[in-house]
Amino acid sequence: MEPLTVEFTAYYRVFVEDVPVSALRMSRPIVMKIVVPAKNQPKNQGADDIPTDTYWASWDGILVVVTWKHEQDTIPRSGGHVVLPILRDAAEKARMEVYNQPCSPGCKNVFTHSILKVVEDTSLNEEEFTLEGNVGTLRIPARSSAKVVNRVTFMKLRSSGGTFARLKNVGRQILDLESSAWVNLECLLDAYKSRIEAGSTPWWRLSGLRARWNVRGWRRLIRDHSARIWARITSAEHLAREWSEGKRRFEENVTEDGVGAILRPDFATDELALTRLDMSRLESLSNQVESRLDNRVLALATAGGAISGAIAGTLVSFLR
């Protein structure tokens, strides 16, 4: 492996379960030949279609491209999945960790949902790329070793693939923040509802006293959830600007390399969800509850001041 260069090796912020961490991107990929018997390879969602026992993988810390020789028309779902546990074991030995960004919560697929077929065609003078649905075909003119084919494929995808990986991570974080904010709003409204129901029972009855005791600290609970909502909204809005800039770079990369177009089907899912994202309802409901709390506190303070003034006036009158 060629030595890494400091100028092109960098750390990027990524999110792992809402926690920001640093992800290393190496200036040059680690190129690996991986040989594992088919019977020892993991099956993707039970699909018994392991295509080979030999893979080539190029990995720069952000993007991994896995290739293998494939002569059948059908595209296997379990091909290459054995690479991920190998990368995780290697990272663990280096006291690091590998995080595989899923397309959505619960998705078990290791790779993107698009497939790239690399075809060697000696009749060509230059590379050609076509895309049909979620299957892209890259035709290369020279016959090369499996290692070189993998490296060439990786370099074709590196710019758009690296940008896509970070874009996908930020997009999922925005959607997770929005989802968490709705959970906080639900808890906030439940606390407010419980207080109203408790207040509807006369306080001099035992049931009324018990109901009020059970919802003690409700103001603090509501303000806590409200603060969390606003923190998540603010973070989501900040990341949305970052995502928009990442989208612009991604489109530029795809225009330059062409091959990155195979990532658009996966990108389109998040793009649709993010462009439809509207947190104004969250803001409105949270503001309404907070406003009612503030009005109640103001009313109590005003009433308290009036009572105090009346008592003071009585005392003055008495002293006269």
Image (cartoon, helix red, strand yellow):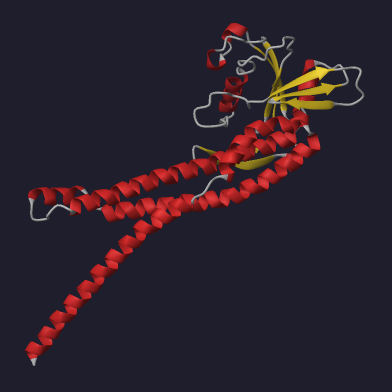
Note whether residue 260 is visible.
yes
Residue 78 in the image: state x and y as whole percent: 60, 15
Count numbered badges in the picture: 0
Residue drawn at x 14%, y 85% as measured from the top left: 313
Note whether residue 22 is visible.
no
Left or right: 242, with 215 as reference point: right
Residue farthest toward the bottom in the current orientation of the protein = 320
Residue 166 in the image: state x and y as whole percent: 63, 39
Q: Quadrant of residue 268?
A: top right
Residue drawn at x 29%, y 52% as measured from the top left: 192
Residue drawn at x 63%, y 26% as measured from the top left: 113
> Compared to 160, does 127 lie above or below?
above
Residue 261 in the image: state x and y as whole percent: 73, 32
Residue 35 in the image: state x and y as whole percent: 67, 12
Quadrant in which the C terminus appears: bottom left
> Compared to 98, does 229 lie above or below?
below
Q: Quadrant of residue 145?
A: top right
Left or right: 286, with 110 as reference point: left
Quadrant in which the N terminus appears: top right
Q: Quadrant of residue 33?
A: top right
Residue drawn at x 60%, y 35% as measured from the top left: 269
